[in-house]
Every structure is written in structure tokens, then in C-alpha cells.
Image (tube, helix red, strand yellow):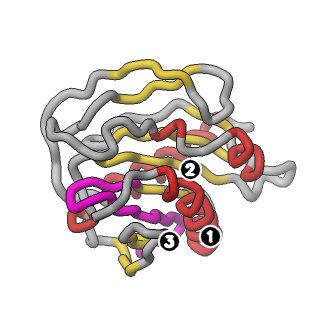
Amino acid sequence: MNRRLAILPLVAMAALGLAACSSTTTGQGTPVTTPAQGGTGGSSPSSSGSSGGGSSALASVQPCNLLSSATLSQFGLSKTQSITIPAARPCDWTKPVDINGANGYSVEIAIRDSQGIKDINTAGNTVTEDNVGSHDGRLVQADAGGGCIVVIGVGDSSRVDVSVAGTDTNQACSVANQLAKVVEPQLPAGS
């Protein structure tokens, strides 16, 4: 697969992820290596603790552990190097394109320890209520198309973003919704 084509969906997802947050947090995250329990067989980078310095119900949850090896296999996902996102702890996967160079996409789960649903940036996005299980949720679609985020609120000031990019909006939202339903039962109760 062409390396430039593999990186393009990650860049698009990072732009969509940055558009989905409106408040900024200063500070410097400390990367640590934790065992990946998502079936990737190695270790994965993640930040420890809260990116905003406050405590969060999500502090002990690692984004790379939220998708099991069975789920990764079901969706054809492979772990990729996560990019740094301000105020978030992300984990990234890709579904490679098929033999015809189509049907590939990127998935990112980003834990935002100090940004809640109220902090979603609506500029350039269409945001609709979309509760997930027992958690308050929002569906965020980029107005320019091609990306979708299911935001799962965990309390008033934290959330988990399940993002899909690199494919058409309908497929991106379908995959994001399916993965959000896998992630949501593993999260602390919302309030």
C-alpha cells in the first residue's frame, strides 16, 4: 500500500478530532508504554492520568484496551502509531484498503479526561443527540463530509470520542456507532 495513502486518513482524522474540541488545556503529557490488551500482541503508547490535571473517572481507562482482539478482527483493524492530540489520550487503528484500493478507513478512540460533551466544537460540524447505552452521547459529522465521531459523555467534564475517517460519511458513522456500542459498556457510569 502506498505510504502516502496510509497516512492521509490519519491526517484527516486528526483534523476532525481537533475540530471536535473547543477548549484547550495547557501542560505536557507523559508518554508511557502499557500492554495492549486489544490483541495487537505488543505494547502501545498512551498518556497516563488526566491531561487537564484534574481527576477523571476515565483516568484508569486506556483507549487501546477498549477494543478486543475479536472486535479488531471483525472490523479488519490493525494498530497504528497514535498521533498526539491536545487534551486527549488517543489510540489508532486502520482497516487497509482492499485489492481495488477501496473500503479502507481509520479508527481512533480518544479519551478526553477534562472535556465533556458541552465542549464539542460545533463549527464546521453537524452535531445531533445520539445517546449510547446508558451514556449521554452526540453524533458529530463533519460538514465537509468523510468523517464521523460518536462522542460518549462520562460525567459533565469528560468523554470518549470514537472517530472514523477516510471513507464516506455514511460508512464512517455506521462503523463509529458499532464501535461505540462495544466501547460504552466498558466506561464508568455517566452522571
In this rendering, position of residue 166 left or right of residue 189: right
Q: Which residue is mark 2?
A: 107
Residue 97 rendering spot, x and y as whole percentages: 75, 49
Q: Quadrant of residue 19?
A: bottom left
Residue 59 rendering spot, x and y as whole percentages: 31, 38
Give the quarter of the figure containing the C terminus.
Answer: bottom left
> Mark 3 or 1 closer to N-term?
3
Decide: few, some or many residues near mark 3? Use Cα within 10 Å; few <14, some 14-19, many ≥20: some
Give the alpha-carbon distance from disc 3 to disc 2, as whole Å: 16 Å
Task: Tell me the SS state at disc 1.
Answer: helix
Q: Which residue is mark 1?
A: 174
Decide: few, some or many residues near mark 2? Use Cα within 10 Å; few <14, some 14-19, many ≥20: many
Measured along the vertical axis of the image, is residue 4 above or below residue 97? above
The structure residue drawn at horizontal position 86% and vertical position 49%, both measured from the top left corner, is 99
Residue 45 rendering spot, x and y as whole percentages: 46, 25
The amino acid type found where label 3 is placed reads: Gly
Q: Quadrant of residue 40?
A: top right
User: Residue 152: within the magenta?
Assistant: yes
Measured along the vertical axis of the image, is residue 53 above or below residue 72? above
Q: Nearer the viewer, mark 3 or mark 1?
A: 1
Count the numbered circles shown. Answer: 3
The structure residue drawn at horizontal position 39% and vertical position 80%, both measured from the top left corner, is 128
User: Residue 190: within the magenta?
Assistant: no
Q: Which residues are magenta?
A: 141-160
Q: Which residue is mark 3?
A: 145
> Mark 3 or 2 closer to N-term?
2
Measured along the vertical axis of the image, is residue 158 above or below residue 174? above
The amino acid type found where label 1 is placed reads: Ser
Q: Nearer the viewer, mark 3 or mark 2?
A: 2
